[in-house]
Amino acid sequence: MNCATIDATESALRVFREVCSIPFGAYPSIEERRGIPEGEHVDRYVPPSVGPDVFADRLGDWLQEFPVAILGGCCGTSPGHLAAARRRSMMESSGEIDRQSA
């Protein structure tokens, strides 16, 4: 799943979980597109709708909930967003974060 909003991506992951027997991944767009007509191309900077920690939390939730093979980011994500997501996944895999009690 590529370049859909973070909420639309999560909805698609729910469907994929039910119907796909092959590995799948997701690269959500986090651009703040309020006020921009849907599907309109913009040739300028569009700020992200969520910060790195929120992005990392959502991807961390997806790692727990869905059988994703790869996660990343599309429009609006920055190296900081991806670094936060990586830190979060490393902390979870090392046991530093207990998602059940969070």
Image (cartoon, rainbow, N blue to C red):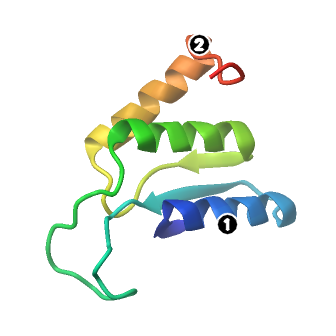
Q: Of all residues shown, which one is farthest toward the left?
A: 44
**Which residue is label 2 attached to?**
94
User: SS for tag 2?
Assistant: helix
- Name the residue located 65 percent from the left edge and 47 percent from the top edge: 69
Q: How far apart are marks 2 and 1 (CA)?
A: 29 Å
Please state the horizontal and vertical placement of residue 74, each as a whole percent of the image.
Answer: 39, 61
Of label 2 and label 1, which has the lower sequence position?
1
Asked where in the image residue 59 lies, by quadrant, the reply is: top right
Who is closer to the viewer here, 34 or 52?
34
Q: Quadrant of the N terminus?
A: bottom right
User: SS for tag 1?
Assistant: helix
**Which residue is label 1 attached to?**
12
Who is closer to the viewer here, 31 or 18?
31
The amino acid pointed to by label 1 is: Ala
- Name the residue located 48 percent from the left edge and 66 percent from the top edge: 5
Please state the horizontal and vertical placement of residue 24, each as a whole percent of the image.
Answer: 67, 57
Report whether residue 94 is seen: yes
Q: Is residue 88 left or right of residue 70?
A: left
The amino acid pointed to by label 2 is: Ser
Report whether residue 21 is seen: no
Q: In this view, does 41 lie to the left or right of 5?
A: left
- Name the residue located 65 percent from the left edge and 17 percent from the top edge: 98
Q: In this view, does 30 lie above or below 37?
A: above
Closer to the observer: label 2 or label 1? 1
